[in-house]
Amino acid sequence: MKSDNSNTVDRNIKSPRYHQVYSAIRGWIFDATYTPGAKLPAESELCKVFGVSRITSRKAIDLLVQEGLLVRVQGKGTYVSDDLAAAPNIGDMQQLIRKTQRLSKKSRVDNIEFKEVVGDDDTCTDLKLPPKSKLREISYVRYIDNRPIGCRFSYMPLDSAIDITAKDLKSEQMLAILEKKGIKISGVHQLLGACTADPLKASLLQTTVGEPLVRIRLIVLDERARPVERSTAFYLADRYEHHVFLTRNQTRESKVAS
């Protein structure tokens, strides 16, 4: 393990200290510094390397365990998971914000509704709330050239729901709104999938039941890594395109070659 000053947490960076530790260890896993099955250094050693408290290092490890990248073995230590295939990729949150901002500029939202609902099991789990918790639901339809391209359903805990108005939604995308309302976002889980239109979504999107849809689920985390908003957007498959440019990791490849 590297022990030079390059690992020390930079207190001038806005990102929380635990997230910097999390990102560094995650980098070690994916650049093969620690391979599947390898034992991670003891928590006390990680604290010295990064110059952080035990609470900070433990929080970083907790996140990696939740992702399935690390496994704790009672009485033995913490190990890199043997199966990293299901681990999420790490991307730049600012890219997501810029992409949604571009979409906002060339489209409009309408059919905005605010409701108080009882959360279903999946939503409550994502928000780390007890089953059947009361939530604030915000939904709307997005249009381009007066044609619906997608609809979005957003949920927040009712007791901590932010005051978001229809005017906010018509002028900004949700991540920007949350930050303007005082939420310090540390990260976002983005999960892409597919489904078909049920009667409600078919009606909102002016299509037929069973039409293919792209499903995008976002779980927004605050600076303490607590879920503050969970949303699912559904886009007509023939009007959605996701462009990613992939590059080779030269550092990792050179290690494998050697």
Image: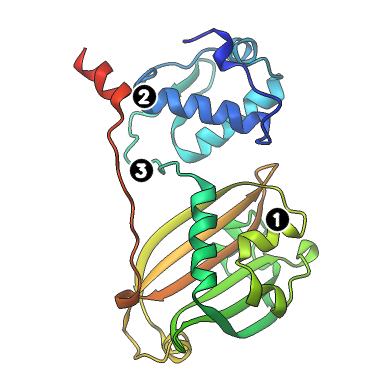
Q: What is the total number of numbered labels drawn onto the structure image?
A: 3
Give the residue pinned by disc 2: 31
- Residue kind at label 1, given as amino acid type: Glu
Q: Nearer the viewer, residue 207 or 58?
A: 207
- Going 49% across and 74% down the picture, which residue do you hit? 106
Q: Residues within 10 Å of mark 3 (few under 14, many from 20)?
A: few
Q: Residues within 10 Å of mark 2 (few under 14, many from 20)?
A: some
Kind of element beneath mark 2:
loop
Q: Are marks 3 and 1 in contact (CB under 8 Å)?
A: no
- Going 64% across and 21% down the picture, which residue do you hit? 9
Kind of element beneath mark 1:
helix
> Is residue 211 in view from this perspective?
yes
- Viewer-nearest of labels 3 and 1? 1
| Image position, residue 152 (x, y; %) | 53, 74
Q: Image check: 165 left or right of 197?
A: right
Give the CA distance from mark 2 to mark 3: 16 Å
Give the residue pinned by disc 1: 179
Ranked by sequence position, the earlier of labels 2 and 3 is 2
Q: Residue furthest left?
A: 257
> Is residue 80 in view from this perspective?
no
- Residue kind at label 3, given as amino acid type: Ala
